Image (spheres, helix red, strand yellow):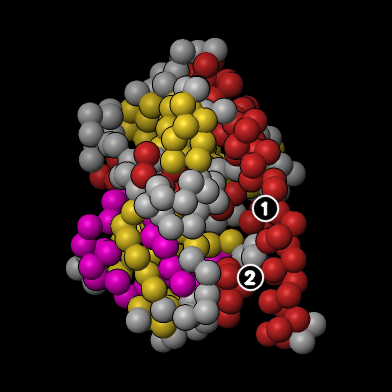
């Protein structure tokens, strides 16, 4: 069993938890993920490692409440335990040799982008960060990103936080004024990553995206997380989650992800009725 050491609400739909998992913390690196079960009857869900503390033996996860499992997970309190917490899985994000990067996070994807920015900054890399949200109420990890960035830009769709606009607009301004990076690292909604990759292609700017399709076993056996990358089939759980953004077939990935949205919504509604009698 894996105890919840800390729980913090980041915004109305996003929660941070710090989990007692020393064996996972010992090996975890930015970009990797874990698979957990809330209880013996629960489904397996993947969540990216948002941070870790090797000395304390803890791993931080950040999740958005979208389906039945994240709803059940969010009902737990500090001191409660998870049934399973397996990892680290996937390939760590390569950070060696990078001298200057632009890290872009969108929405809850900023939770995945932050540990990468943090590690690169600690290695002496010049980090430019752009994070975007729909509105001020949804902003997460702003202070953490500022601490890990040489340049930090906050955007929001409605202008209630930072500058009004999209992350692609802020990135274009940086590129147009002559900024060039060893890598642009984009993590967030599929549509956001698609348009970041479209933009950077025109500048000949290397771009890495983090893909998080539906996963079941996390070992490449089920095929649920398959993607088309450079005309080849890849599996995000073992070949990724990082891929060349200019080679990912985003239209296919977006279409596949959309298939599951009605099921998530129905499962969430049923969980509400079960636990709260709504």
Where residue 260 is drawn, which disc sits there? 1
On the image, the x and y values in percent for residue 105 come to 52, 42
Q: Secondary structure at mark 2?
A: helix
Q: Is residue 253 above or below residue 36?
A: above
Residue 84 horizontal side relative to residue 26, left or right: right
Residue 211 horizontal side relative to residue 136, left or right: left
The span shown in magenta is: 8-37
Q: Is residue 267 above or below residue 142?
A: below
What residue is shown with label 2? 68
On the image, the x and y values in percent for residue 263 come to 71, 60
Residue that sits furthest to the front in the current view = 221
Sequence-first disc among 2 and 1: 2
Q: Is residue 51 visible?
A: yes
On the image, the x and y values in percent for residue 227 come to 51, 36
Q: CA distance from mark 2 to mark 1?
A: 13 Å
Q: Is residue 252 above or below residue 219?
A: above
Q: Nearer the viewer, residue 175 or 16?
A: 16
Q: Is residue 168 visible?
A: no
Residue that sits furthest to the right in the current view = 278
Q: Is residue 32 magenta?
A: yes
Where residue 245 is drawn, which disc sits there? none
């Amino acid at each position: 069993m894996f105890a919840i050491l800390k729980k913090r609400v980041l915004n109305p739909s996003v929660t941070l938890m710090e989990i007692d998992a020393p064996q996972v913390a010992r090996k975890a690196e930015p970009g990797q993920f874990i698979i957990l079960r809330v209880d013996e009857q629960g489904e397996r869900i993947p969540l990216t490692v948002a941070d870790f503390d090797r000395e304390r033996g803890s791993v931080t996860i950040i999740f958005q409440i979208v389906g039945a499992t994240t709803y059940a997970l969010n009902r737990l309190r500090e001191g409660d335990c998870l049934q399973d917490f397996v990892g680290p899985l996937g390939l760590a994000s390569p950070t060696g040799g990078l001298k200057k990067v632009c890290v872009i996070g969108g929405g809850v994807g900023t939770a995945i982008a932050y540990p990468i920015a943090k590690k690169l900054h600690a290695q002496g890399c010049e980090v430019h960060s752009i994070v975007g949200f729909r509105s001020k109420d949804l902003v997460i990890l702003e202070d953490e990103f500022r601490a890990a960035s040489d340049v930090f830009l906050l955007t929001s769709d409605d202008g209630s936080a930072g500058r009004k606009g999209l992350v692609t607009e802020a990135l274009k301004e940086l590129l147009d004024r002559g900024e060039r990076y060893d890598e642009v690292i984009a993590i967030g909604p599929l549509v956001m990553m698609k348009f970041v990759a479209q933009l950077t292609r025109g500048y000949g700017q290397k771009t890495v995206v983090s893909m998080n399709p539906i996963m079941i076993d996390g070992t490449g056996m089920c095929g649920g997380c398959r993607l088309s990358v450079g005309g080849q089939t890849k599996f995000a759980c073992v070949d990724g989650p990082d891929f060349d953004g200019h080679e990912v077939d985003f239209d296919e990935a977006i279409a596949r992800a959309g298939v599951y949205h009605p099921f998530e919504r129905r499962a969430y509604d049923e969980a509400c009725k079960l636990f709260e009698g709504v």
